C-alpha cells in the first residue's frame, strides 16, 4: 500500500494555509511530493484541481483532490489515523474547530487588512489582540492547545500568528503582544519553536517579511 | 444517562444556521430545549455563552457550550454517533465539509449582498448561480448529497438555499434556478421536502419572506 500511495501537495512557500498542511504530513510521517506554485502565475494543474477558489493548498491523494486547509487537516487525520492531531473527545474537537475558524476568518483578515488600510489599522490591531487573548486563555496550564503534544490547532494558530502575522514587519502592531500581557501565548510559541517538524516549516524570516511587504503593496495599490 | 442529559439550543426561528442544527437533532432523535432569541435584543445568556460572535446557534450539552453551526453539526455526529450524518469515508467527508464552507461563506454572502446592494446585484446573482451549479453536479445520480439518506450537506445546503435564499422574495434573482437548467438540484429539493424532519424545520413561507425583507432593509439603511 505504502509504495503505491500518491500524495501531492500544491503550495506556496510563504502561505500559512500551506505550512500547516506540511506540519501535519510531517507529524504523520507521510512522504509527499511538493509542488511550488507561483502567486501571480498559477499552474494549469492548480486551476484544474481548484476551479472554484484557484488557491493553494491542494492535496491530491491517490487521484482524489482535497481542498481548503482546515478540511485537508481533518482529511489527513482521518485517512492516516496514527499520530492523531485532533483529540478523540467531541468537545475538545469542537473547540479546536471553533478557534481554527476564528483564526482563519477573523485574525487573518484583521491582521492583513490592518496592514493595508491605515484608516482602519488601530481598530483592527486592537481586535486582533482581543482575539489572541481568547487563545491566551485556552493555553493556561497546557504545553500545546491539545495538551501535551502538538496538533491541529497548534498548526493552524502557529502557521498564522507567530510564524506569519506576528513576524513583525513594519506597522503590523502586534509587537504589543508582549510576554507580560500574553505569557501563556508566548510560552506556547517557545514550545512550538522547539518542535522539529514545526521548525522545518517556518519560512526564512527576512525572505518572508519581504514577501509580505510585497503582498501589502499589492493590496494597497489594488 | 438519557434522563440526565441536558441539551439546549439557542436559536432564531428564521436562521438557516439554526434550522440545520434542529434537523440534525431531530434526525438523531435527541430531545432538546429550544430557546428562541431575539435578533435585536439578545439575551444575557447568549452573550455570556458566545461572547466573541454574539450569534445563534448555541448548543449547550451537559454544561458544555458548542458554537458555530458547522462545528455544532460535527459535534452532534460525534457525541451521538447513531444515524450518522457524515459518511465514514474521509474523501466523502472532505467533500461535504468543502461544500458546506462554500455555501456558508460564498453562497450566503452573495445571496444576501445581492439583495442589499443594487449596484452589485447582477454579478452576485450570477456568481450564486455558478456556485449552485457545482452543487448540481454533485447531485447527479444521488437522492441526497450523501447518497440514499439525508445528512450533513443536505441540512447545510437545504437550510440555506431552497428554504432560505431561494424562497423568492422580491429581487433576489434566484428564480433563474429553473428545473430546465438545474434538474438535479430541483429533484433534490423535492426529495428534501418529503422528509418529515426537514418539513418540521422549514419556516412558514410568508412570515419568513417578511422577516427577510426586514433584514434587507436593515442592511440597506446601515
Image (cartoon, coloured by chain):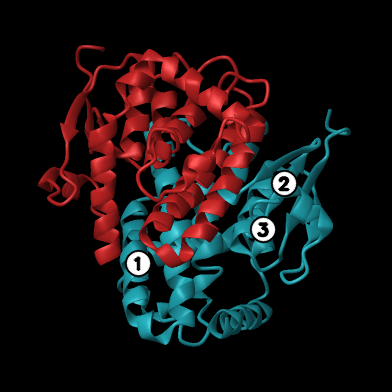
Chain colours: A cyan, B red
Q: Nearer the viewer, residue A178 or B85?
A: B85
Q: Is residue B222 visible?
A: no
Relative to B22, residue B132 above or below: below
Task: Report whether residue A20 is seen.
Answer: yes
Label 2: how many Cα within 10 Å (few below 14, some 14–19, many 20+): many
Residue at the spot of label 1: A183
Q: Determine whether the residue tagged by mark 1 lies in a helix, strand or loop.
A: helix
- Residue B62 quadrant: top left
What whole-number distance in Å separates the C-alpha atoms at marks 2 and 1?
Answer: 36 Å
The circle on residue A162 is none
Residue placed under numbered mark 2 in the picture: A59
Residue shown at 77% from the left, 55% from the top: A46
Query: Sequence-wise, which precedes: disc 1 or disc 3?
Result: 3
Q: Residue B111, how many percent across, how many down?
A: 44, 50
Q: Judge from the rendering whether residue B51 lies leftward or rightward of residue B108; answer left or right.
A: left
In the image, what residue occupies the spot 51% across and 72% down?
A165
In terms of secondary structure, where does tag 2 sit?
Answer: strand
Total residue callouts: 3
Question: In the drawing, what numbered circle is on residue A55?
Answer: 3
Q: Which residue is drawn at 45% across and 58% down?
A: A105
Amino acid at each position: 500500500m505504502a509504495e503505491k500511495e500518491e500524495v501531492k501537495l500544491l503550495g506556496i512557500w510563504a502561505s500559512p494555509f500551506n505550512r500547516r498542511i506540511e506540519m501535519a504530513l510531517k507529524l504523520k510521517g507521510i512522504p509527499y511530493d511538493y509542488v511550488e506554485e507561483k502567486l501571480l502565475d498559477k499552474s494549469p494543474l492548480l486551476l484544474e484541481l481548484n476551479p472554484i477558489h484557484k488557491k493553494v493548498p491542494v492535496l491530491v491523494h491517490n487521484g482524489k483532490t482535497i481542498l481548503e486547509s482546515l478540511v485537508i487537516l481533518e482529511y489527513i487525520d482521518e485517512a492516516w489515523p496514527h499520530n492523531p492531531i485532533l483529540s478523540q473527545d467531541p468537545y475538545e474537537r469542537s473547540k479546536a474547530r471553533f478557534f481554527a475558524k476564528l483564526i482563519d476568518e477573523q485574525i487573518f483578515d484583521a491582521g492583513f487588512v490592518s496592514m493595508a488600510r491605515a484608516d482602519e489599522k488601530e481598530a483592527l490591531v486592537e481586535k486582533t489582540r482581543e482575539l489572541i487573548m481568547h487563545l491566551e486563555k485556552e493555553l493556561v496550564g497546557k504545553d500545546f492547545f491539545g495538551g501535551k503534544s502538538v496538533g491541529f490547532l497548534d498548526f493552524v494558530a502557529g502557521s498564522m500568528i507567530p510564524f506569519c502575522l506576528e513576524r513583525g514587519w513594519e506597522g503590523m502592531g502586534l509587537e504589543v503582544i508582549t510576554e507580560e500581557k500574553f505569557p501563556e501565548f508566548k510560552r506556547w510559541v517557545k514550545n512550538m519553536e522547539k518542535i522539529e517538524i514545526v521548525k522545518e516549516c517556518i519560512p526564512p524570516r527576512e525572505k518572508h517579511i519581504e514577501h509580505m511587504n510585497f503582498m501589502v503593496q499589492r493590496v494597497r495599490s489594488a
